[in-house]
Image (cartoon, rainbow, N blue to C red):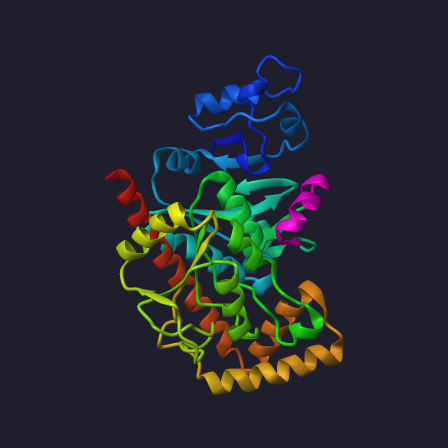
């Protein structure tokens, strides 16, 4: 499959004002013009010091350029979320769910130091099996690029690269948030600040239930991130359909979501939006049982001295063990469902855009 390199506006490497200068971006600019990718002018020094490329397969590039529906997918669930071969099966299944709805799937990762918007089948398989794949939030992208490392993108990093490439919709399992005990640990996920500043619509099953969900919702309200319940009035608790907390607003169709997203792009200050979808009823777990499993998992994490980025995967693995694998089954089902819903929303956004 042919791939296109283009300058990312996310890193301010916009070259129109530098043609004829010594910034070395003439070819990149000409390629961007040829492939109809919009580049806005900026100062020469910004282009020189912030040049980072995105690799985009031709099919994804063409869809973005013509306003066709594209759904971003993360790669952390592949490298750090599930064991092999379930991780590979899930990655393939999520892309299939997106395509079945008429949208294009673009799994995002940093491959050998190169941010990639639309990983190939071979690259996804490599991430599913390779050891040493980094786990990247936004702060970690630069390190992976500079050191030519493989890096699986979390919600925050996936949003950043999706927005850089012009993809508006992203499907994931659950976002990070305010951790339990954050009043002393200050453990708050970068996903929340990313949602506040990056214009991507994130489709998920709420925040991961191992978190302080009430505090997470308060944080999202403070930073101005809309939270929409999809066909529900309750904020999901990842494995469970109802956390006991209400959502501020509700949408029942992809068209309603698309209309709200379009209005948010105008009036929302440039940030993202959260569309929360309850897990499928047939695999959703009782809230009480999940809470018991989480309490045991938290105790094990504290005893083991788990800190930082290791906390979430440790707790998810511990909850899976506590629930005898039922939580993994729920996780896989909700990820596939979210990919499907995200594709439907992306399609509605594309249709609304073409009608303008």
Looking at the image, can residue 120 be seen? no
In front here: 285 or 195? 195
Image location of residue 36, percent across then percent down = 42, 26
Q: Residue at x 63, y 23 (%)?
A: 44
Image location of residue 225, percent across then percent down = 47, 58
Residue 169 lies left or right of residue 192; in this view the side is left
Image location of residue 187, percent across then percent down = 66, 67
Q: Quadrant of residue 231?
A: bottom left
* In the image, residue 307 above or below residue 295: above
* In the image, residue 188 above or below residue 63: below
Badge count: 0
The single residue placed furthest to the left in the displayed view is 355
Q: Residue at x 57, y 27 (%)?
A: 42
Q: Which residues are magenta?
A: 134-148
Residue 110 lies left or right of residue 143; in this view the side is left
Residue 275 lies left or right of residue 134; in this view the side is left
In front here: 325 or 192? 192
> Magenta includes 295?
no
* In the image, residue 197 above or below residue 218: above
Q: Quadrant of residue 111?
A: top right
Q: Quadrant of residue 23?
A: top right
In front here: 15 or 304? 15
Q: Quadrant of the C terminus?
A: top left
The majority secondary structure of the magenta stretch comes to helix
Looking at the image, can residue 280 be seen? yes
Image location of residue 18, percent across then percent down = 59, 19
Q: Residue at x 66, y 53 (%)?
A: 133
> Magenta includes 144?
yes
């Amino acid at each position: 499959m042919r791939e296109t390199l283009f300058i990312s506006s996310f890193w301010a490497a916009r070259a129109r004002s530098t043609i004829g200068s010594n910034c070395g971006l003439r070819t990149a600019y000409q390629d961007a013009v040829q492939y109809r990718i919009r580049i806005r002018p900026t100062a020469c020094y910004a282009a020189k010091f912030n040049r980072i490329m995105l690799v985009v397969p031709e099919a994804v590039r063409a869809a973005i350029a013509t306003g066709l529906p594209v759904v971003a997918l993360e790669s952390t669930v592949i490298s750090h979320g599930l064991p092999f071969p379930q991780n590979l099966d899930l990655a393939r299944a999520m892309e299939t769910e997106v395509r079945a709805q008429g949208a294009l799937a673009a799994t995002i990762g940093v491959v050998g130091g190169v941010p990639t918007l639309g990983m190939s089948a071979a690259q996804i398989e490599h991430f599913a099996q390779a050891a040493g794949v980094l786990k990247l939030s936004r702060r970690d992208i630069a390190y992976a690029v500079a050191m030519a490392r493989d890096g699986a993108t979390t919600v925050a990093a996936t949003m950043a690269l999706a927005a850089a490439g012009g993809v508006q919709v992203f499907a994931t399992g659950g976002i990070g948030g305010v951790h339990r005990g954050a009043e002393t640990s200050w453990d708050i996920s970068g996903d929340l600040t990313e949602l506040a500043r990056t214009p991507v619509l994130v489709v998920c099953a709420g925040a991961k239930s191992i978190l302080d969900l009430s505090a997470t919702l308060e944080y999202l309200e403070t930073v101005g991130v809309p939270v929409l319940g999809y066909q529900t009035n309750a904020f999901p608790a990842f494995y469970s359909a109802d956390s006991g907390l209400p959502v501020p607003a509700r949408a029942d169709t992809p068209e309603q979501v698309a209309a709200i997203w379009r209005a948010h792009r105008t009036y929302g200050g440039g940030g993202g939006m959260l569309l929360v979808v309850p897990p499928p009823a047939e695999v959703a777990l009782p809230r009480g049982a999940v809470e018991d499993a989480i309490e045991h998992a938290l105790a094990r994490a504290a005893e083991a001295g788990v800190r930082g980025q290791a906390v979430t995967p440790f707790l998810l693995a511990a909850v899976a063990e506590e629930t005898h694998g039922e939580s993994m089954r729920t996780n896989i089902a909700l990820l596939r469902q979210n990919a499907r819903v995200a594709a439907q929303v992306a399609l509605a956004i594309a249709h609304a855009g073409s009608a303008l």
